[in-house]
Image (tube, rainbow, N blue to C red):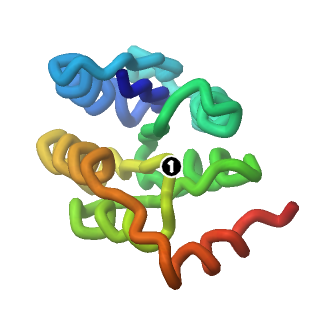
């Protein structure tokens, strides 16, 4: 059974709720680290727990959401075992998996609709890493 960790700041409670509903309908187990309110919070506080779960292999993938998707992705990417990709279309989401072996998808809530966000997540989870020439590149990403 696939396991996903999800985290969001105040820009993404509605997105998270819709994505969690979508995932659970497919039998995917979701750990929710995100806020459920629109009260201002700090995105690293919600991105780091997702990144830790991905890095420690407690989950298969992570989903993070903030206004632009950038701040929370930057936070998650501080973890050596994380490759968080900012994705605003399903096509970019597919490439993040195929070419970059991304294990966290970052969604910009203020620049996508909820339906687009669900499509981005669905594509991300359904797309396999192509390996091959991309594996050498991916292996050079971490600083360890």
Q: Is residue 60 left or right of residue 27?
A: right
Quadrant of the drawing holding the C terminus: bottom right
> Callout 1 environment at 10 Å: few (<14), some (14 to 19), or many (20+)?
many
Of residue 39 and residue 69, the one placed in the foreground of this image is 69
Which type of secondary structure does the marked residue at label 1 adopt? loop
* Residue sticking out furthest to the right: 144
Q: Is residue 129 above or below residue 133?
A: above
Q: Is residue 51 left or right of residue 143?
A: left
Q: Is residue 55 above or below residue 141?
A: above
* Res 112 seen here: yes
Quadrant of residue 96 within the rendered picture: bottom left
Of residue 108 and residue 62, the one placed in the foreground of this image is 62
| Residue 106 picture location, percent across and down | 44, 49
Residue shown at 66% from the left, 53% from the top:
77
* Res 9 seen here: no
Quadrant of the drawing holding the N terminus: top left
* Residue sticking out furthest to the bottom: 133
* Residue sticking out furthest to the front: 132
Residue shown at 22% from the left, 60% from the top:
90
Residue shown at 30% from the left, 22% from the top:
28
Report the residue marked by disc 1: 103
| Residue 133 picture location, percent across and down | 52, 84
Number of numbered discs present? 1
| Residue 84 picture location, percent across and down | 54, 54
Residue shown at 43% from the left, 28% from the top:
4
* Residue sticking out furthest to the left: 115
């Amino acid at each position: 059974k696939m396991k996903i960790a999800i985290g969001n700041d105040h820009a993404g409670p509605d997105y998270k709720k819709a994505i969690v509903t979508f995932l659970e309908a497919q039998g995917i187990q979701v750990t929710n680290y995100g806020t459920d309110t629109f009260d201002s919070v700090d995105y690293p506080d919600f991105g780091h727990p997702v990144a830790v779960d991905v890095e420690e292999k407690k989950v298969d993938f992570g989903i993070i959401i903030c206004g632009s998707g950038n701040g929370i992705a930057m936070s998650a990417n501080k973890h050596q075992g994380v490759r968080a990709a900012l994705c605003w279309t399903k096509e970019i989401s597919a490439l993040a998996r195929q070419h970059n072996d991304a294990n966290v998808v970052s969604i910009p809530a203020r620049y996508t609709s909820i339906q687009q966000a669900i499509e981005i997540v669905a594509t991300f989870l359904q797309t396999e890493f192509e390996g091959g020439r991309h594996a050498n590149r991916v292996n050079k990403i971490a600083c360890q």
